[in-house]
Image (cartoon, rainbow, N blue to C red):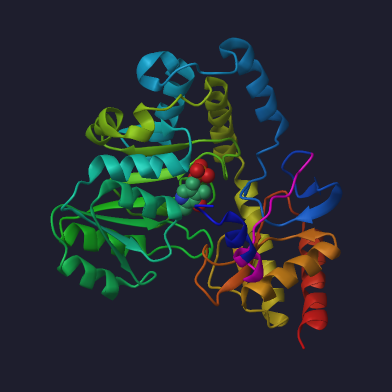
Amino acid sequence: MPMDWHGRLAERRAAGLYRRRRTVSDGQSVSQIVDGRRLLTFCSNDYLGLAADPRLSETLRQAAKRYGVGSGAAHLINGHSVAHHALEEALADFVGAERALLFSTGYMANLGVLSALLKAGDTVIQDKLNHASLIDGARLSQARLKRYRHNDMASLQRALRNATGDMLIASDGVFSMDGDVAPIRQLQDLAEQNDALLMIDDAHGFGVLGEQGRGSVNAAAAQTPIYMATLGKAIGVAGAFVAGSSDLIEILIQDARSYVYTTAMPAALAEASCASLSILKQEQWRRDHLQDLIQYFRQEAARLALTIMPSSTPIQPVLLGEAETALAWSQALEQQGILVTAIRPPTVPKGQARLRITFSANHQTHHVERLLAALANCQKILSL
Ligand SMILES: *Cc1c(COP(=O)(O)O)cnc(C)c1O
């Protein structure tokens, strides 16, 4: 056998790093049937609780009547519909950019942006904890990839000092596994001082932070030439967009291979995203309620002496250390009817395995109370 798949899988299992899927038989909500069992869930990125909103389902149904299901072709052929165009205009307007461009997923948006803008000889400088898609985009671009210590501006400055070619700094706006926020104003200053471009991936900030949910750049009263966010998290649908100047968008339309060589997202989904955008702007209560849940959880988790992280966002990890420990806690929670996934290496650094708890505007205080009681039980059962 040329490749020992069986041995490779066995190694994974032995290291406590084996991943498996669960099968959900109903929609996204805080209470789901998972592998046939009803669980209270704290792991979705559906932060505003819109993924199963009946108004969006109805919009989707109506839009499918008009546009059908498939988009049939890429945007540059005949797959670009008025629904896509309207969503791009609404998104650009919302985040205060000249234009926006839709991608089918956030992963593809990041691959497309970095590989289109950078070439061999350029330097892309990234936070150590950036999302995998930004790292993969950098690799694909063939530019030199440098990584600075998480949110450490001195470390970023050192990386900038011996960079070559055109420079692009990329950072998550909200870090997906830690929940903390990037120092966006400082990133903007350093980028400007060094004549570098700044790109913020706001997958977890868009819809949640800033005025009416305009995102982490808006919350920081900053501006960035390249803003990327996804439509599968707070928006509750699927896809992603990049916002910036008209020239940036035109370059991406020409050269972003993950834009050019792929089928457009279904137009009906674009219309559902458009509907979600107007709901999330108007329904400030969703963000206010989320903040209340976050405050409450943090206060009570600190009382239990759990190791929480400096996060003010709906991502509230509980740090546990070894992969096996995180797995044991996750299993103990599941036995108590609660689903929180264990996040293990390589998604997070070795020794920093954790429970990644996320909150949704659909959670109620009593749900958080149940979670805290279950975590307290885990402490009793699992700490020797
Ligand atoms: C989820 C995520 C992505 C990928 O977006 P998809 O639409 O799920 O492909 C990119 N960046 C960050 C920071 C993310 O959390």
Which residue in the rendered view is the most extreme toward the bottom?
384
Q: Residue furthest top?
A: 66
Q: Position of residue 381 (x, y in %)?
A: 83, 80
Q: Is residue 15 magenta?
A: yes
Q: Which residues are magenta?
A: 11-25
Q: Is residue 144 left or right of residue 95?
A: left
Occupied quadrant, residue 247: top left
Residue 204 spot, x, y in % from top left: 51, 52
Magenta stretch secondary structure, dominant: loop
The answer to whether any part of residue 320 appears in the image is yes
Q: Quadrant of the C terminus?
A: bottom right
In terms of image quadrants, where is residue 92?
top left
- Give the image location of residue 356, x and y in percent: 63, 63
Q: Residue at x 33, y 33 (%)?
A: 257
Q: Nearer the viewer, residue 287 or 237?
A: 237
Image x and y of residue 334, in percent: 80, 62
